[in-house]
Image (spheres, rainbow, N blue to C red):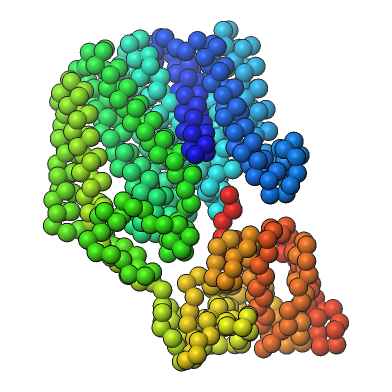
Amino acid sequence: MIEPVLNGLLYTLLALLAGVFVIQLVPKERGVSKQPAPLTVMLLILGVPLIFSGYLLRLAVTYASFFSISYADAVLTVMNEHIIGVSFLVIIGTSITMTLIYLLMEKKQKALAAGINIVLVLVLIAAVSFSSHSASITGIQGIVSNGIHLFAMSFWIGPLFMVSLYGSSLKDPQKFHQWFSSLAGFCLLLLITSGFIMMGEIAPEYVNSWMLTYGQLLLIKHILFIPLLIFGFRHLLSLSGKGAKLSTEEQQRSFRIEAIIALLVFSVTAGLTETEPPHNVLRTLQSEPMSPIMDIFLNEALLENQLIAFSPSIGAIFLLVAAGIFLLVALFCGWWFRKTWYTAASTVLFVGTAYLGVMASSSPGEIPVNLTIHDSVEEAIAVGNEDDEIELIETVELDDHSIGAIYSVNEQHLTAERLLVEKDGYRKYLDAEVELENGFLTGGERFMDTFMFIENDWIDEEKVSTYVSLGYVTEDISEVEIVFSDTVEVVPVSNQVFLHVLSVNQAFEEAHRFILYNEAGERVHEVEKRQFIHEGHVH
């Protein structure tokens, strides 16, 4: 439960820091004249490494227990070997620099100090993004998308926090509107773009993810995001003089409600980190129960391995139409009425009906797992490849009840999958397939790679990591030696292909080698690989 709290506090601190320094950078006549006390600003800066240390200490507890080492050694191990340790050191150094700049330059060169510290806030955001969920799944792409997402939220919501706290000292609403609306619009565009990218990485099965706690939180976050836009619309019109003219008190109340909604979004986002991202919903359901909320809305029980579909009933359509009406009412109230509670009340009604309408639209969907017993290997591997040209190259015995089928797809890709051997034929697994894309086109006379899984169907009893090595070699090669950091595996070659599955209770170093031998046992060639292909994910 501690991680959501840490995340919520961290996101709020980053937004507050962004807001403080953006407001300090803006001339007083375009912002608010009253600002946080210097001690408050320093506490905000130093609060970031203090909160982030919670991640490090939490991981150190796990290390100490798992490796049976002292807590001090565990802390040093995390600092030296884990990305969280590296991020923590960067955050400490950046926070100290920000504090010194603020103390030494704030009085005489306030704008310059604010500009430098804004850059350093970006460094803090980058350091946090390096240890994020997205980074662990897709590497650089995840770091960039998470960083953009966090930047957009911080620099949009941060100034909003400042105005909600010190809005009574807002000098000129129209001048504030001129720069803040542009900044908010830019951040909103980044937020939507990065949000779609991250959703594709973490929850590609969006509708099906509603069956899980993670998907429920994600849906709630997306619905709560719309009230932020409603109040943003209200403030855009009000500050520009095109909407209801708000008194100073009513204006600050309106900004505070928007800030509260932003805190709710931060809280839900923080809760997302405590639950497992559903990269494959059906696989996740094998180890995690379906959200009890989904049971309430489904009009009939799901069959085994059945997913859901978005299929609105008459009642659901009524709720969705009502949500649309409340949305229009909220926008009208935001534009026309001075009293904030009109907008707030219609917004609450929108959130409630929108959530109920979406959930009531859920119904039993497809059953993606192929339970058919196929007469032959060729028939089994053809499932899902109906429009492709499939050629079976070789089969390999993996254990007493399963085999690995190695085949080419359209004379381009080399694919391998695990098949269950039944009495009457062969059955496919849910998640036991690897593919070397375009291997026959770009790989030359030999190509090979190793896939790393955290969750998979390649083995029956999952361990910490599973490594699946697949390759194509020249005719003279009869044996391949796969050299991992802590073990060496010898794999026979048949029909110029090889397949090897290894599951261990540890994580190997990324760098590994393939050593190729001919029938005489002579070493013919060596292939160096710098990293695995990560089909699973690491936290």
Q: Nearer the viewer, residue 147 or 204?
A: 204
Q: Is residue 120 left or right of residue 267?
A: right
Q: Nearer the viewer, residue 365 or 106?
A: 365
Q: Is residue 53 left or right of residue 347?
A: right
Q: Quadrant of residue 231?
A: top left
> Looking at the image, which residue is at 74% across and 47% down?
68
> Looking at the image, which residue is at 39% across and 59% down?
205
- Could you tell me residue 340's position as x and y percent? 21, 23
Q: Nearer the viewer, residue 184 or 43?
A: 43
Q: Quadrant of residue 104?
A: top right
> Looking at the image, which residue is at 26% across and 54% down?
296
- Could you tell me residue 486's position as x and y percent? 78, 62
Residue 199 appears in view: yes
- Could you tell me residue 92's position as x and y percent? 65, 28
- Could you tell me residue 281's position as x and y percent? 42, 61
Against 432, residue 390 (above or below) is: below
Against 173, residue 418 (above or below) is: below
Q: Nearer the viewer, residue 464 or 394?
A: 464
> Looking at the image, which residue is at 59% across and 33% down?
54
Residue 378 appears in view: no
Q: Is residue 339 left or right of residue 90?
A: left
